[in-house]
Image (tube, rainbow, N blue to C red):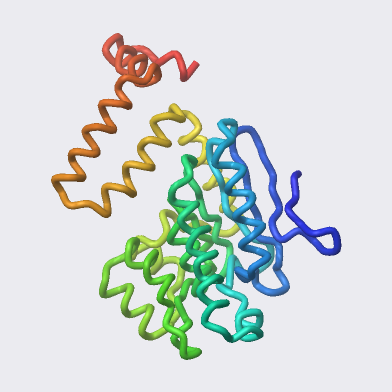
Amino acid sequence: MNQTHSATELPYVLRQQTGGVVTLTLNRPNKFNPLSEEMMTALQAELNQITTDPQVRVVVLAAEGKAFCAGHDLKQMRAEPSNAYYKKLFNQCSKMMHTIQTMPQPVIARVQGLATAAGCQLVAMCDLAVAATEASFAVSGVSYGLFCATPSVALSRNISRKQAMEMLLTGDFIDAATALDRGLVNRVVPLEFLDEEIESIANSILAKPAVAISMGKQLFYRQLEMGIDAAYQLAGQTMACNMMDEAALEGVQAFIEKRDPAWKK
């Protein structure tokens, strides 16, 4: 297991790789895994390394302890009350969130407990999310006088506007079943089946050609921000490029010949 850490304390992020799947685990359970400067720096370093590693096909973002992530470290934020510091901090967080969306590998959030504020944002920014039955979600900054502005960017791109605004304006928690119903997570299972469910999704992705997955992920998020004409133009260009790849040519030929493609053997 590789670890990202300083010489004097436990690593902020644990890394474990099994085949083409890397699991990154937030490792401050006693503090509910806040997105401190140090946590974000450690996670950014791991994501940067994975982005350029063709051996990694899927990333699972997990956490130690009862909480997935409680958002920013409020004590750390309060210790340096300056506009310049806060801009730097939120820019660091936004860069990390953007990396999750732009990296070629799909990222699956493993949500075993509560995910609040920027922790809920982290779930929303992952490509997929699987939650334990007892998980809960909130963008609760408003309860402390701080509207969750940056989390609202991710949240509003996952669930409907009315539902997003209700969460943002009230700060109230929703349970895993409600998160599933609203589209914030893909699946909800009992905690003891959480890893099994994620493994099933990961294996399904691993069975597909990497080039199709990475091109498709990039296209999906880019077209969402475009008008319909531009989106179709980009999608057509992407499909044309994808079709010229050897994996796609083999896959289509295998379909015509009613056999499994060579890359499945």
Q: Residue at x 41, y 35 (%)?
A: 213
Give the image quarter of residue 162: bottom left
- Please identify the residue farthest to the front as the structure is shown: 84
Q: Residue at x 34, y 49 (%)?
A: 221
Q: Position of residue 165 (x, y in %)?
A: 31, 77
Q: Which residue is drawn at 40% across and 66% down?
A: 179
Q: Residue at x 44, y 47 (%)?
A: 102
Q: Looking at the picture, does residue 133 appear above or below residue 144?
A: above
Question: For this rendering, which residue is in front, 163 or 216?
Answer: 216
Question: For this rendering, which residue is in front, 66 or 83?
Answer: 83
Residue 25 is left or right of residue 235, and the answer is right
- Please identify the residue farthest to the right as the structure is shown: 8
Q: Position of residue 65 (x, y in %)?
A: 68, 66
Q: Looking at the picture, does residue 105 appear above or below residue 153?
A: above
Residue 126 is left or right of residue 66, and the answer is left
Residue 201 is left or right of residue 226, and the answer is right
Q: Position of residue 68 (x, y in %)?
A: 59, 65
Q: Position of residue 217 (x, y in %)?
A: 38, 42
Q: Looking at the picture, does residue 2 appear above or below residue 123?
A: above
Question: For this rendering, which residue is in front, 11 or 199?
Answer: 11
